[in-house]
Amino acid sequence: MAEEHPTGHGAGDPEQPSIARVYDAMLGGTDNFPADRAVAAKIQSVLPISKENAWRQRELLARGVRHLANEGIDQFLDLGSGLPTVQNTHQIVQALNPDARVVYVDNDPAVFARGRVLLADDPRSAVVTADLRDVDVVLDHPEVCALVDFDRPVGLLMVGVLHHFADADDPGGVVKRYLDAVPSGSRLFLTHFRANPPVSDDLEKVFLTMLGSGRFRTQTEIEAYFDGLVLDEPGVVAMPLWKPDGPVAVPLDTSGEMIAAGSGRKP
Ligand code: SAM
């Protein structure tokens, strides 16, 4: 396996690709540099539908946020939020509940810069720069404490981020620490690269070699993030099958199988 770097290793350095900027390039955004575009192009060459997949994940984020909001969640921690493009969490949830609160957390300063502009007129949303692995720093952050009431259910969003944690980061342990901090009735929604060899092996090599992170974990490993929670229907499934808005063509193409999604409730 290629070497894994600490997550977010290019954040803040335009010469090195960063996860957030590569994702922005995949989505056709403008907040990226040649180093980021080179990674995006390589990913696209291994799996030609990757850019479409990035958009599918944004749509999935919207479905996840709406599901949690419909279950009564009105405060969200969007952990590993990425560069806001269109359809951001606060816009999705505030369309259903104008009083809902959202705190975006990301370790890439580019996310902070863009988010500050986008959220300038919204007193119910904030963006915080922090490493998610520093769970106490995130939970004790003044902006988080100002907007999130930890005595009431919280929606934890971890969309497209946990696969950027190395095994040594103990991603399951990090998830558990966030879950321990929120009360009964809170919900977790996550997506994760899922192993689907041989293509996922090739993609993992590209991610680890060029970006330093990007692990394709097994269905069992992904389900384990929900230990202690009551899984929502339809369980942990391929991205297109998670609460689709319309009919889905089956069998899924390879790329559809490559990202899994699930949500669960803390009993
Ligand atoms: N959640 C967004 C979405 O689904 O559109 C963005 C996903 S993007 C692929 C992953 C994001 O996680 C990036 O913005 C990256 O900077 C962030 N990230 C990765 N590791 C992180 C860490 N340890 N702490 C905070 N953010 C992290």
Image: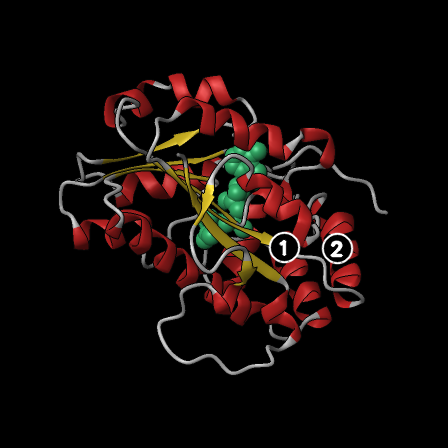
- Give coordinates of residue 126: x percent, y percent: 29, 34
Could you tell me which residue is drawn at 32 percent across and 58 percent down? 87
Distance (Cα) linking label 2 and label 1: 9 Å
Q: Quadrant of residue 120?
A: top left
Q: Above or below — where is 24 with respect to 76?
A: below
Left or right of 202 on screen, residue 252: left
Cβ of disc 1 within 8 Å of ligand 1?
no
Q: Which mark is residue 204?
A: 2
Q: Which residue is mark 1?
A: 193
Q: Above or below — where is 245 with respect to 130?
A: below
Could you tell me which residue is drawn at 51 percent across and 24 percent down? 177
Could you tell me which residue is drawn at 59 percent across and 77 percent down? 252
> Does residue 162 appear in the picture of this structure?
yes
- Give coordinates of residue 125: x percent, y percent: 25, 37
Q: Nearer the viewer, residue 178 or 13?
A: 178
What type is the residue that disc 2 sits on?
Answer: Glu
Q: Nearer the viewer, residue 64 or 161?
A: 64
The reply to whether dot 2 and dot 1 touch (C-beta < 8 Å) is yes
Residue occupying the far left of the picture: 98
